[in-house]
Amino acid sequence: MNSIKVFSPASVSNVCCGFDVLGFSIDGLGDELIISESNSNKIKIKRGNGYDVPLSADENTASVAAQSLLDFLDINRGFDIEINKNIKPGSGIGSSAASAVGAVYGVNKLLGSPLKKHELIKFAMQGEFVSSKSAPADNVASCLHGGLILVNNRVKYNVVNLPVPENLYAVVHHPHIEIKTSESRVILPKSVDLKTASDQLASIAGFIHSLHTADFDLMRLVLSDYLVEQYRSEHVPFFNQIKNISESKNVICCSISGSGPSVFSLVEGKNMAKKLKSIYDEVYIKNSVEFNSYVTPLNAKGVRAV
């Protein structure tokens, strides 16, 4: 095998209470990468389709991630990468992570899978650092493993796949504006008080317990973001309006994905998710804002060959 096509999904990060450590992949939305061996002994971005991507190998998250993998393995071989970019950069749903994960996954496959999937995360993160030097691993881990994950941001990036109740769905809306992660982190406070930290800890602990017990009432009770939502909400178009609608519809939670501008809600049941999607759609339509919207289970697959 000297060529492979890879689907690498978009992802939601933070998930209300899990700043930088919780994430889940989005079903049906992602980048496609075609990776082929070449005789150049270099990683090249051969072509970018869809949303614009840097073609320089030093600036593209996919090529940087793939090269870091080759350097680690001490392999001097060349690969051409074509990226069908379906996730808008700066969308808050893991655009840079998808390209980076797809590249290391595909190159590792073409090399005969010398590394296991969980070992690829640190190389994909090298690509993430191109877009943001302080990038956390929640999008990369979600894209790589699929499902709902908990990840630490230490060197080994330990990932835990969390159980997902069968009837738990997400509604994701992506307005077509760009918010760079590096810029959105500047507005966050450098420190938080103990009460805020305690509230956030209680929220994430309660959420994880509710996943194990499939307790949707507990999810509604505990899921809140005390750390970042209040600082980012004013920069996300119509977020407060959508948040008010969500509260009137008794959703499990409504918050900002990553740095924004994408917004997501967790709901019980696919039918409720579809209804909520239509209601949110109207907010953007009435305000003449271009957007995409999705309904996804929280147990969607991660990166894979197609």
Image (tube, rainbow, N blue to C red):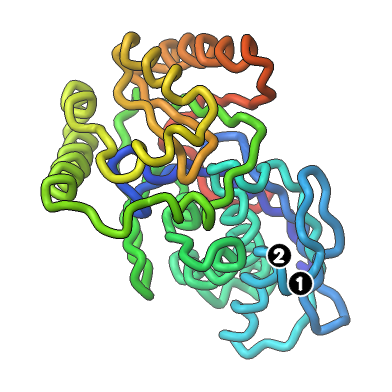
In which quadrant of the rendered image does the N terminus lie? bottom right
What's the residue at 18%, 21% (across, down)? 217
SS for callout 1: loop
In the image, taking residue 190 as reference, residue 214 lies left or right, namely: left
x and y, in percent, of residue 81 in the image = 78, 63
x and y, in percent, of residue 247 in the image = 31, 15
What's the residue at 65%, 36% (across, down)? 177
Circles 1 and 2 in contact, beta carbons < 8 Å: yes
Image quarter for residue 69? bottom right
x and y, in percent, of residue 5 in the image = 73, 54
Residue type at the position of mark 1:
Ala
x and y, in percent, of residue 160 in the image = 31, 55
Q: CA distance from mark 1 to mark 2?
A: 6 Å
In the image, taking residue 128 as reference, residue 85 lies left or right, namely: right
Quickly name the residue at label 2. 60
Residue 57: which disc?
1
What's the residue at 63%, 90% (across, down)? 74
